[in-house]
Amino acid sequence: MLRSLFRAAAGSARLERLVESTPGSKEMAKRFVAGGDAEGALRTVRGLTDDGLAVSLDHLGPESGTPERARAVRDEYVALLSRLRDAGLTPAAEVSVKLSALGQLIDEKTAYEHARAICSAAAEAGTTVTLAAEEHTTTDATLETLVELRREFPSTGAVLQAYLRRTEGDCRELATAGSRVRLCKGAYAEPESVAFQSSLDVDKSYVRCLNILMAGEGYPMVATHDPRLIAIAEDRARWFDRGPGEFEFQLLYGVRPEEQARLAAGGHTVRVYLPYGRQWYGYLMHRLAERPANVALFARAVSSRK
């Protein structure tokens, strides 16, 4: 029920105007979004890297409904990567890219060319790109694009969602030498035919997938705030004799910063997922929609900076 409400809220222009005009809403957004433009993002990246954290930047722009918007997203990322390089913030800072924002639903070939341009800019900047996962209907196309990009840019990262029933098989396919794989729980409303529905089943799938990645030859990126799964990941890394530089943890900007500091102090690579851009309202609503428990998580984060 809550999930459906927040997803509906994300698409409501009227509610967006109301929330943005509400006192405190922009202050709340600042906890989770690094400003409205690249300038603000770079300042935040500098602070995080000075604290010993790595970063994955995601540009929050309008959804790509036209070829012009897709090109604008490509150009934004290319310019951002140049600025990161010039500021000396790479390789600690990489970028995360949604193929839908590059026009995947309009023309897959053109979306691939845009992604290739971003990967080329990342290579010139001395860093990497991770292709975000979206609805299950795009998974095959996204993984096919990943394969093509890795022919030229082998460090291109993948994102797999543990709540999809297919993901164990995808983990086996991608747990190869040099393969960067971000494992998250899952962010979209999916039918039972393709996705686990209960939190317990999703968590069990996450652990099975984590075991496959940790046992493989790739580079697992453990994206979760769940204390139990973080503890399991630390245990599995020890079991499979992985050192701190052979996998990493990923957490959202503004969420559990004390845990980010703890993991980093323990010698782990910790990468902060850092969105920036003017479309912060939709980002917050979608994050709340992912799991009802996030409502309390965000509320606690707003009231405390611990």
Image (tube, rainbow, N blue to C red):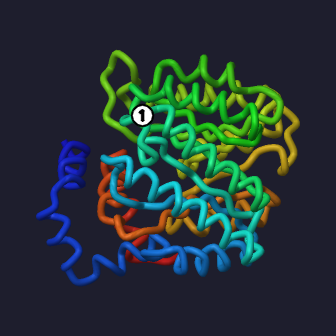
Left or right of 2? Residue 100 is: right
Judging by the rendered image, the residue that carries numbered circle 1 is 107
Q: Is residue 296 above or below residue 220?
A: below
Left or right of 26? Residue 31 is: right
Q: How many marks?
A: 1
Residue located at (15% from left, 72% from top):
18
- Residue 297, by quadrant, is bottom left
Count neighbours of disc 1 (C-alpha within 10 A) and say few if under 14, some if 14 to 19, many if 20 or more. few
Residue located at (20% from left, 65% from top):
16
Comparing 62 with 305, the one in front is 62
Q: Is residue 6 above or below residue 17?
A: above
Q: Residue 251, position in %: x, y?
A: 58, 56
Q: Residue 93, position in %: x, y?
A: 69, 63
Q: Is residue 245 above or below residue 84?
A: above
What amino acid does circle 1 point to? Asp
SS of the residue under disc 1: loop
Q: Where, quadrant-wise, is the N terminus in this rendering?
A: top left
Left or right of 171? Residue 299 is: left
Q: Is residue 82 above or below residue 222?
A: below
Q: Residue 6, position in %: x, y?
A: 23, 51
Left or right of 301? Residue 117 is: right
Comparing 221 with 260, the one in front is 221
